[in-house]
């Protein structure tokens, strides 16, 4: 059974710092991996989608990498801002399935 | 495009009552999903659909039912509500799970007392 783990559960950084969020998964047979952002009381917003054949994706200050063989992905946020404060969720699409399996998320606080 | 819309935003149910959570998408996506999110936990898949007339169980389907009569709509039915169904429910859609992003609705916060 696929399990997705996100470490740390919470992270607090000063504004301007570069930071890395981690995601690991137990079964490397995945179709893709997706990073989401969730603001308090809101739905999820897709940030980046990495196909299994890709190594990384970039959008603005965000860069996500994927190492399928080791079961790891990282989300790199450059020059963090208070507006980046949210919970970040990682999810994998399991091979042979139509389903996403989610981690529990990392709650990020960026202090002014 | 409105994207994925859900109604209601909030609801309080008494134990044993029934209700339907509505979900509509206007992106002509084939795939639709229902998740629940409990505090401090990730999302768990309840049911999903790969097209009109086709539905399948996810990880936590007990106590729920779904139907998919049109591409746009994917309602979730709770029969005989129980306190364990207190949660936030999210509907999502995608063109394809295998290659496409999932787009989420704003959620329905349900309390069963």
Image: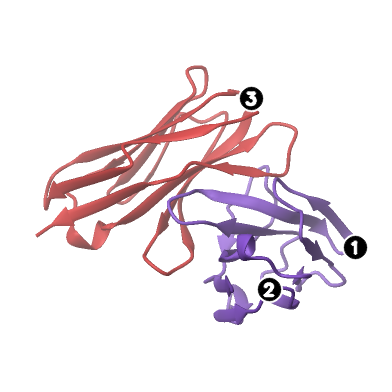
Chain colours: A red, B purple
Q: Is residue B25 visible?
A: no
Q: Is residue A41 visible?
A: yes
Which of pointers 2 and 1 lies earlier in the amino acid sequence? Answer: 2
Kind of element beneath mark 3? loop
Residue A84 percent across, percent down from the top left: 26, 57
Residue B104 percent across, percent down from the top left: 56, 63
Sort mark 2 into few (<14), some (14-19) or many (20+) by Cα contacts within 10 Å.
some
Residue under numbered circle 3? A29
Q: Chain of mark 1?
A: B
> Is circle 3 on the same chain as circle 1?
no
Q: Nearer the viewer, mark 2 or mark 1?
A: 2
Kind of element beneath mark 2? loop
**Of the pair B54 and B42, the residue shown nearer to us:** B42
**Label annotation for residue A57:** none
The residue at 23%/44% (across/down) is A11
Horizontal side, residue A73 vs residue B24: left or right: left
Kind of element beneath mark 1? loop
Real-space Cα separation, disc 3 to disc 2, in angstroms: 41 Å
The residue at 50%/48% (across/down) is B42
Q: Which quarter shows the N terminus of chain A?
A: top right
The answer to whether A3 is drawn above or below residue A59 in the figure is above
Residue under numbered circle 2? B15
Residue at the right extreme, as displayed = B53
Horizontal side, residue A64 vs residue B6: left or right: left
């Amino acid at each position: 059974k696929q399990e997705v783990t996100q470490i740390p559960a919470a992270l607090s950084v000063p504004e301007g710092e570069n930071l890395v969020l981690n995601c690991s998964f137990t079964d490397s047979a995945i179709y893709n991996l997706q990073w989401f952002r969730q603001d308090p009381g809101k739905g999820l917003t897709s940030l980046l989608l990495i196909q299994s054949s890709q190594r990384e994706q970039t959008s603005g200050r965000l860069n996500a990498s994927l190492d399928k063989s080791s079961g790891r992905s990282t989300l790199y946020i450059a020059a963090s801002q208070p507006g980046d404060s949210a919970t970040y969720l990682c999810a994998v699409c399991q091979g042979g399935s139509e389903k996403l399996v989610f981690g529990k998320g990392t709650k990020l606080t960026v202090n002014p | 495009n409105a994207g994925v819309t859900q109604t209601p935003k909030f609801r309080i149910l008494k134990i044993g009552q029934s209700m339907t959570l509505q979900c509509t998408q206007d992106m002509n996506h084939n795939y639709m999903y229902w998740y629940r999110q409990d505090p401090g936990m990730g999302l768990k898949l309840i049911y999903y659909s790969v097209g009109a007339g086709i539905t399948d169980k996810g990880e936590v389907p007990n106590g729920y039912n779904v139907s998919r009569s049109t591409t746009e709509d994917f309602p979730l039915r709770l029969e005989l509500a129980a306190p364990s169904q207190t949660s936030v429910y999210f509907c999502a859609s995608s063109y394809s799970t295998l290659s496409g992003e999932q787009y989420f609705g704003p959620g329905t916060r349900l309390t069963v007392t």
